Image (tube, coloured by chain):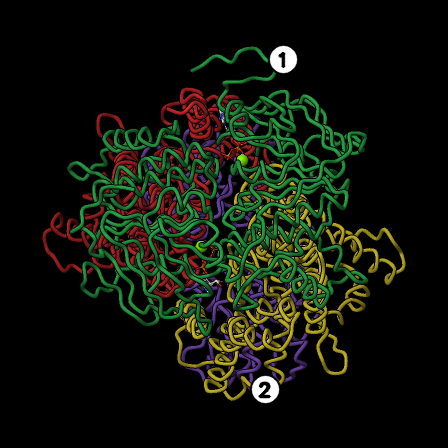
Chain colours: A purple, B green, C yellow, D red
């Protein structure tokens, strides 16, 4: 088989979910290289948009036939991605879409569905606790976080569900612990906590446990970390469900990209992954004990 | 003394009933003082009498609490922070006022750089710097960084800075404290030259002979009060000293006490070599006071720091009571009872931001440790003891060292070293900035130490001090010990001859003259 | 604290009350001001639960900042503490998970000992690089910051490291969540650490040497103080404090990750400076530091409890409050 | 002339020549070493494309670090530059999107002017707080760091701010991606900024005063230098440099967000220190700073081009390289 190189640019493992991305990217890279003897897959991580733009340049210098990129922040990276695409490289964007997400930017878009992540959580709350008082812990102030919030608002629209507060927890356990503790001080009655990320859920649960508050019916995290899925599986009352937002989507994109450059199948356009609601019944399908996330 | 025209006797600058308080502490009490055109006016007084404060007030670095300042007879408010230079009033600070990262020529022109079309004219600034430095007969390079200069060289830069200004009045706060006789003579030459052109000087000094030699009038302060102003010609050293101290002084120097030839050798230095000092060898006996004389930059400080273990030696041996001390082992030497008192009290001697207690016990803190913790009461006792013993005068007990008067800082430094109760003491410039009264105390103190069986090395640029105190004198020149003088030979002429390279030690080849 | 200056007769004490005390009191005045503001913002604020939550939470930063007080007093700076927390915590949990010792309490004791040793070694490494390597502490510890963080990421493979045994978790949990006579353990630990630190800084030879080295290295050298040894020791103390903070941190969530302790170094340094210790080195104020750590935590708490601030603006308001607190301090100190 | 003072000026002069030059050359030696390592790691490394890529993207940090050289030389520190980039860039893009001026090139010119003004004002704010407010620059700029970042988050409502008009993007793009005679524009901008900065620092009265203020404030004050004015001006220069960096940053990505410029302040300071300027203030080395910025960017580039380092360990290796680079520098400087 002819030699080809796929460059994979992903965010650095700065919290649990991105750690999962790194894990799956490396896992699939090994698989692909075994499958296609001439194929070289180079995985690079970057902590922020500016250094990811640099990483793209560096990958280009090495010479790549295809690029799989999960942008730290899509809009600032559009120009850099276009630069790669202009040279005829096959480009797949994963998860985070720039505002102008068309053929001039990429060939393939494998979408994690951020609005749906929020919407599914919202709908669950609307369905199960229609009069709930909810506190929300946000991630970092970047667009995907905003999309999740918008999705959530859409999910609870038309119900009596009331959002008491939204604060940033920076996708960090310690910050989430702090924010939750203060929520508990501030609001004598909270029904549901939506913290949209399983890392933050760890801190939230600990804060609730310490305060010995019983008014909170349940919390909803998100992304499907192994610890939280385990809790769902075990029927933990506080964690009845989780919303899947699999870090493995980067692997899916890499497999599709490899297929494209070896002309096995024509892959173009958008592949959207569902934001599946994980319940006690389907949880074991999503449980990967050996993943770091 | 000089041909000052009669009409020029009008005061240029005058203080009228000036008082000054720092917080609640009053340090000047309604002082009157004036400087006439073309005169050199000496300002004398004990340590802490308020000389520096008065001089700062007259040059705008401090504002008086009450009273007036008159410039050419008109009351003025002196602009702060050196801006008074624009009025022709310049101050050479008692403590250096130079920034380490600048070069000599940059320092000279700091704040009044010469520019051409907005660009620094480095060439012309360097040229002018060279000119002034040459006038002062110093070979300091105009591009040398201030941080690389010795204390004396820094003083020369300060002087150069002052005389390069087109000044009407120059205040010099103890400019000669760190200068040797040679440099002092050059400085006086410049002062006389400028005086002839009508510049006035205020000369603060503790060196009576210099005052007698150079000045036209003398004003004496005591405890912040004006005591007397009189033409120098009607006074003599003794009279001034008496005015300052308020009592009659006995002889300045105590009787010399020569140790027996068979006294134990406590310190022996053999062929010690550092970057600059070469092959220096000498012995020090128990109960001996050994002097080190020489010109600026002759390497005395470097030698002594190497002996004390503050600088690495390249070669040579230092033995204390026969025990060899490794190179750079300051603490090893200290354990053997050797103490070194630096002459750079601001840079190496005192923590200026801390009070007396912290400074006093810094080196001897072990003495105040009880069961693992510091006994602050015993520290306070040590402070009280030291203040009595060294006559440290402060008006506020908690004053930071940096705010004490120069002389009192020096006494505190001496006290700090003495807290160690060392057997061998190296004192670099023991009386830098110290008034006559205290000087006498310190001299007697040194002599008493020697009688107790301690050994002392005195490094000094004051020839009279060396001659008055020491039984043996080493003269250094260009990094070598040029001669070791004893008995009759310890006099000004012989020391000068060795220091200047006109006589040389027997075993040394004739030094090439530059 | 003025322990260091109260060696004296009456006159002296009076004077020091005026000059030194106002400066030392200033951070506490700022703290009081914040408490008043907080009480106005939300009635729950002043409740025992909330205040004890805040104090407990501030434990990590407070304890680390006590160590930073030593380093900063000695004229250095340590930017690596945040990632050192992550690194030391990772090693501690990995050791606890290794099952090297069967008995849980024995295992815990061994883990505690190991943590303290690792912390000190990390501090020592910083100290060696800055003193023997003669690299500016800012850069040296920025380097080790990268190193400790990188090693943590590698150990955790980017994910989290969690205490596996539930038994051990249960055994260890009270160290953060427990209380003695109604006072949460972390608050007691803060007090103990601060008392010891104040004793060392104000009442021992070493403390005096730290001040001397921080205010003028040359003077310290000419006074026979082993400057490098003193500085190195300060870094070791910092490492020890980080280890103590880790001992409290691990039982809280029972886990650590590559993001643990990010930006804690800036918070610790801020606490020290807000507490009145100058970054240039010299006199350190341990009690002020603790006060500074409380102030930082309180500011965040008040933000969250107040209802009228957009979540987007919290950072801006926090910055403003810190600046205002410093201005209050300055104007108080200048009064003296 | 006197006999005693004849230790030769020659000897002295030579000494100072040696001393100063080797120290200034040291960062360049470290740079050369890195280039060699890079060439060994990957043959593509030494290609013109790669090197010019690296130089081009070091532009942001390099230009900001030039400003930081002034602030640091004057004895201060500015931690707010990273968030200042985000804030200034947000305002610039918002203005461009506002459509206040119809003609695109005129609009662009106005936006550029606005950016420079806003940058200077941000710098001035920092300067006022540190000098008039008498707050340690570390804390003051940590405060404004929060403020600028918070305002950016608020302006962007947590999302990104993107240049809307494609026409304007096209017009503006060459400022980052274009080149003159084969040299990328950002490299030319670096050169221009550095030349001007070197001129100001070494050839003007103001530059001299910066050194004096940083070396010893009392001395500077006693020499009739307006210390606060000089420091304030240094902060303004820093703000201007940030604005220039923004002018290059916006055309590159055409957008900015609340996370833009995070940790750039540490990188800028590192560049300055690696370049040989002491954090304590005093002599600033503008060329060394540029060299430092290249070194930082090169380290990242080499990491990326080498394929044998676990991505988890990149941070650790980066930290190690910085420490080693400093050690190389020190040992070179000590040779003198
Ligand atoms: N800034 C200050 N704050 C408080 N006290 C001060 C300050 N400056 C000087 N003093 C006090 O004022 C008194 C006079 O000091 P001054 O420096 O004028 O003495 P001096 O006559 O120059 O002594 P010396 O001969 O030792 O230099 C001293 O007691 C000193 O401690
Ligand atoms: N020709 C020279 N070449 C290099 N350095 C020299 C030369 N002459 C003098 N020095 C420097 O001068 C210093 C000697 O000054 P030192 O302070 O030891 O002398 P000193 O006799 O105590 O005079 P001072 O009163 O100036 O201190 C040495 O540190 C040395 O570096
Ligand atoms: Mg004086
Ligand atoms: Mg000397």
Tell me whether marks 2 and 1 sit on the same chain: no
Image quadrant containing the N terminus of chain C: bottom right
Between B118 and B292, which is closer to the camera in this rendering?
A: B292
Q: Residue at x 64, y 62 (%)?
A: B388
Disc 1 crowd rating (10 Å Cα; few below 14, some 14-19, many 20+) is few
Look at the numbered discs 2 and 1 and tell me whether their residues touch, using CB distance below 8 Å: no
Residue pointed to by mark 1: B507
Give the percent coordinates (x, y) of residue A100: 31, 51
Q: Is residue C7 left or right of residue D53?
A: right
Give the percent coordinates (x, y) of residue C65: 60, 61
Q: Is mark 1 within 8 Å of ligand 2?
A: no
Give the percent coordinates (x, y) of residue D82: 39, 52
Q: Residue at x 65, y 27 (%)?
A: B486
Q: Is residue D320 left or right of residue D32?
A: right
Between A68 and C53, which is closer to the camera in this rendering?
A: C53
Does D127 sit above or below residue C233?
below
Q: Is residue A180 left or right of residue C207?
A: left
Chain under callout 1: B
Does D328 sit above or below residue B226?
above
For marks 2 and 1, give the one nearer the viewer.
Answer: 1
Between C148 and A87, which is closer to the camera in this rendering?
A: C148
User: Element at badge 2?
Assistant: loop
Q: Which mark is residue C47?
A: 2
The span from disc 2 to disc 1 (Cα, nearest Å) is 88 Å
């Amino acid at each position: 088989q002819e030699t080809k190189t796929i460059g994979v640019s992903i965010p650095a493992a700065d919290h649990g979910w991105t750690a999962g991305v790194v894990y799956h990217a490396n896992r699939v890279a090994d698989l692909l290289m075994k499958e296609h003897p001439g194929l070289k897959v180079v995985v690079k991580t970057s902590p922020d948009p500016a250094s990811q733009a640099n990483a793209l340049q560096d990958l280009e210098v090495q010479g790549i036939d295809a690029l799989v990129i999960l942008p730290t922040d899509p809009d600032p990276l559009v120009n850099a991605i276009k630069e790669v695409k202009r040279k005829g490289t096959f480009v797949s964007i994963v998860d985070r879409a720039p505002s102008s997400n068309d053929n001039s930017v990429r060939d393939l878009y494998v979408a994690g569905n951020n609005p749906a992540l929020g919407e599914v959580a919202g709908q669950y709350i609307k369905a199960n606790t229609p009069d709930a008082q909810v506190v929300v812990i946000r991630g970092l102030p970047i667009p995907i976080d905003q999309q999740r919030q918008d999705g959530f608002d859409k999910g609870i629209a038309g119900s009596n569900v009331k959002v008491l507060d939204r604060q940033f927890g920076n996708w960090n356990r310690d910050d989430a612990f702090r924010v939750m503790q203060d929520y508990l001080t501030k609001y004598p009655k909270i029904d549901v906590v939506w913290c949209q990320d399983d890392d933050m859920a760890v801190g939230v649960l600990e804060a609730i446990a310490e305060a010995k508050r019983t008014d909170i019916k349940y919390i909803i995290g998100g992304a499907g970390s192994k610890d939280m899925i385990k809790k769902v599986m075990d029927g933990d009352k506080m964690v009845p469900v989780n919303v899947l937002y699999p870090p493995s989507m980067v692997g899916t994109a890499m497999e599709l990209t490899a297929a494209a450059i070896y002309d096995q199948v024509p892959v173009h356009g958008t592949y959207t992954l569902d934001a599946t609601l994980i319940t006690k019944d389907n949880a074991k399908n999503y449980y990967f004990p050996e993943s770091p996330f | 003394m000089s041909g000052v025209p009669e009409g020029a006797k009008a005061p240029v600058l005058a203080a009228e009933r000036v008082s000054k308080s720092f917080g609640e502490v009053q340090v000047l009490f309604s002082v009157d003082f004036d400087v006439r055109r073309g005169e050199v006016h000496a300002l004398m007084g004990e340590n802490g009498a308020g000389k520096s404060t008065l001089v700062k007030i007259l040059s705008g670095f401090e504002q008086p609490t009450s009273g007036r300042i008159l410039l050419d007879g008109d009351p003025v408010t002196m602009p702060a922070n050196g801006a008074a230079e624009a009025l022709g009033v310049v101050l050479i600070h008692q403590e250096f006022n130079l920034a380490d990262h600048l070069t000599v020529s940059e320092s000279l022109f700091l704040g009044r750089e010469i520019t051409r079309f907005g660009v620094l004219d480095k060439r012309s600034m360097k040229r002018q710097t060279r000119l002034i430095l040459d006038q002062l007969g110093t070979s300091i390079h105009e591009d040398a960084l201030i941080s690389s200069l010795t204390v004396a060289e820094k003083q020369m830069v300060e002087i150069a800075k002052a005389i390069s200004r087109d000044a009407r009045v120059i205040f010099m706060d103890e400019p000669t404290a760190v200068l040797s006789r040679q440099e002092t003579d050059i400085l006086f030459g410049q002062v006389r030259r400028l005086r002839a052109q009508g510049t006035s000087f205020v000369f603060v000094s503790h060196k009576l002979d210099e005052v007698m030699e150079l000045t036209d009038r003398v004003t004496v302060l005591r405890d912040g009060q004006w005591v007397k102003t009189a033409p120098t010609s009607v006074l003599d050293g003794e009279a001034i000293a008496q005015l300052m101290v308020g009592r009659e002084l006995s002889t300045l120097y105590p009787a010399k006490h020569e140790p027996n030839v068979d006294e134990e050798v406590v310190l022996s230095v053999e062929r010690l070599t550092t970057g600059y000092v070469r092959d220096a060898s000498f012995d020090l006996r128990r109960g001996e006071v050994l002097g080190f004389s020489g010109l600026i930059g002759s390497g005395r400080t470097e030698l002594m720091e190497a002996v004390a273990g503050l600088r690495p030696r390249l070669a040579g041996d230092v033995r204390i009571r026969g025990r060899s001390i490794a190179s750079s082992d300051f603490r090893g030497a200290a354990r053997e009872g050797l103490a070194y008192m630096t002459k750079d009290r601001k840079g190496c001697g005192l923590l200026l931001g801390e009070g007396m207690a912290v400074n006093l016990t810094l080196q001897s803190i072990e003495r105040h440790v009880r069961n693992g913790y510091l006994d602050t009461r015993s520290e306070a006792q040590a402070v009280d003891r030291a203040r009595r013993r060294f006559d440290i005068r402060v008006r506020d007990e908690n004053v930071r060292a940096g705010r004490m008067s120069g002389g009192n800082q020096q006494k505190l430094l001496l006290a700090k070293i003495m807290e160690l109760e060392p057997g061998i003491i190296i004192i670099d410039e023991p009386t830098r900035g110290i008034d006559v009264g205290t000087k006498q105390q310190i001299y007697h103190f040194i002599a008493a130490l020697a009688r107790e069986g301690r050994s002392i090395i005195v490094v000094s640029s004051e020839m009279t001090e060396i001659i008055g105190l020491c039984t043996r004198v080493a003269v250094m020149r260009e990094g070598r010990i040029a001669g070791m003088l004893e008995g009759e030979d310890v006099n000004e002429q012989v020391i000068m001859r060795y220091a200047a390279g006109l006589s040389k030690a027997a075993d040394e080849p004739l030094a090439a003259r530059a | 604290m003025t322990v260091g200056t109260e060696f004296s007769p009456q006159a002296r004490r009076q004077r020091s009350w005026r000059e030194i005390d106002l400066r030392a009191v200033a951070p506490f005045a700022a703290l009081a001001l914040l408490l008043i503001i907080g009480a106005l913002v939300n009635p729950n604020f002043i409740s025992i639960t909330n205040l004890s939550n805040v104090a407990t939470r501030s434990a990590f930063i407070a304890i680390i900042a006590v160590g930073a007080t030593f380093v900063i007093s000695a004229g250095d700076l340590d930017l690596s503490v945040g990632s050192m927390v992550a690194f030391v915590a990772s090693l501690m949990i990995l050791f606890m998970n290794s099952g090297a010792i069967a008995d849980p309490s024995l295992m815990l004791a061994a883990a505690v000992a190991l943590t303290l040793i690792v912390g000190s070694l990390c501090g020592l490494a910083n100290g060696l690089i800055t003193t023997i390597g003669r690299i500016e502490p800012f850069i040296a510890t920025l380097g080790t910051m990268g190193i400790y963080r990188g090693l943590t990421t590698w150990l955790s493979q980017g994910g989290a490291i969690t205490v596996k045994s539930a038994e051990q978790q249960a055994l260890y949990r009270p160290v953060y969540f427990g209380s003695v006579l109604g006072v949460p353990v972390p608050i007691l630990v803060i007090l103990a650490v601060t008392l010891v630190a104040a004793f060392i800084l104000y009442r021992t030879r070493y403390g005096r040497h730290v001040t001397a080295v921080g205010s003028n290295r040359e003077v310290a050298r000419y006074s026979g103080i082993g400057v490098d040894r003193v500085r190195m020791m300060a870094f070791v103390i910092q490492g020890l404090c980080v280890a103590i903070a880790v001992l409290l941190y691990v039982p809280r969530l029972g886990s650590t990750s590559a993001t643990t302790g990010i930006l804690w170094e800036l918070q610790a340094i801020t606490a020290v400076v807000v507490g009145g210790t100058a970054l240039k080195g010299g006199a350190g104020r341990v009690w002020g530091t603790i006060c500074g750590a409380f102030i930082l935590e309180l500011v965040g708490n008040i933000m969250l409890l107040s209802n009228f601030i957009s979540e987007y603006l919290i950072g801006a308001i926090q910055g403003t409050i810190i600046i205002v607190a410093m201005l209050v301090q300055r104007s108080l100190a200048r009064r003296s």
